[in-house]
Amino acid sequence: AQSVTQPDIHITVSEGASLELRCNYSYGATPYLFWYVQSPGQGLQLLLKYFSGDTLVQGIKGFEAEFKRSQSSFNLRKPSVHWSDAAEYFCAVATGTASKLTFGTGTRLQVTL
Amino acid sequence: GAGVSQTPSNKVTEKGKYVELRCDPISGHTALYWYRQSLGQGPEFLIYFQGTGAADDSGLPNDRFFAVRPEGSVSTLKIQRTERGDSAVYLCASSLNPRTGGGYTFGSGTRLTVV
């Protein structure tokens, strides 16, 4: 069965600094990978997804992620963080049919001014 | 509608009672999912509908949980004999066709508290 590990429970960065959130997955076949963001009291918003092709994926709000098969990783990056980026971030993997997502436990991002 | 609508947004119930949670997906989305998110955790899959039928219900924790989608649109998650451990946020999502790579759209969830 697939699994997702987000090793960082909580990260604090200064506004304007760069950001990298880590995600490692375990899945036997080619994964479908996602990053979602969740603000307090809100639903999950899709930031970006990887299905195939170019391993560097661009998403909304200036985020990008890189799929590295050799490392089973799909880390999320942003070159310059804004205070409004403070939220919970979830990495997820889906099976080939993309019918069911398995989420990591999330990383809470705090942004200091 | 423009997004996935879930009602109620909050529900407090007594242990042992029956509850129903409603999800109204985006119009035309054939796939519908239910997830449960406990405090400090990521969402966990419960059930997936393709049209009116449950294509995968492997995430339902026990037979107290049941979900229906009789007309292929609105879905109801039903929990019998609620327990305090059922307290969580229940999220619904819909998708036009996950097999073509479309991402899911999530609702804001129903926060269920069992006292």
Image (cartoon, coloured by chain):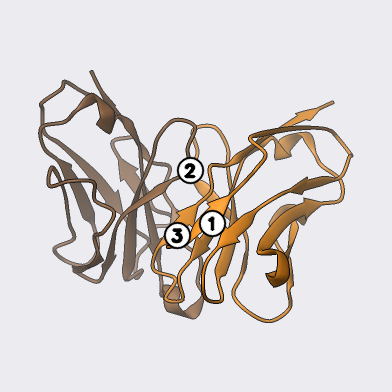
Q: Which mark is residue A101?
A: 3
Chain drawn in brown: B
Q: Amino acid at mark 2?
A: Gly
Chain drawn in orange: A
The residue carrying pointer 1 sits among few (fewer than 14), some (14 to 19) or many (20 or more) residues within 10 Å by Cα, namely: many
Q: Residue at x 63, y 79 (%)?
A: A52
Q: Residue at x 18, y 60 (%)?
A: B69
Label 3: chain letter: A
Distance in Å between CA atoms under marks 2 and 3: 11 Å
**Quadrant in the picture for residue A62:** bottom right
Q: Amino acid at mark 3?
A: Leu
The residue carrying pointer 2 sits among few (fewer than 14), some (14 to 19) or many (20 or more) residues within 10 Å by Cα, namely: many
Q: Is residue A68 above or below residue B115?
A: below
Residue B105 in the figure: left or right of residue A19: left
Residue with the mark numbered 1: A92
Looking at the rendered image, the quarter that the C terminus of chain B falls into is: top left
Please tell me whether mark 3 sits on a helix, a strand or a loop.
strand
Q: Position of residue B10 (x, y in %)?
A: 32, 29
Q: Amino acid at mark 1?
A: Ala
Q: Answer yes or no: do the residues labelled 1 and 3 have beta carbons within 8 Å?
A: yes
Q: Position of residue A73 (x, y in %)?
A: 68, 61
Please tell me whether mark 1 sits on a helix, a strand or a loop.
strand
Q: Residue at x 39, y 53 (%)?
A: B4
Whichever of callouts 1 and 3 sits on the residue coming sooner in the sequence is: 1
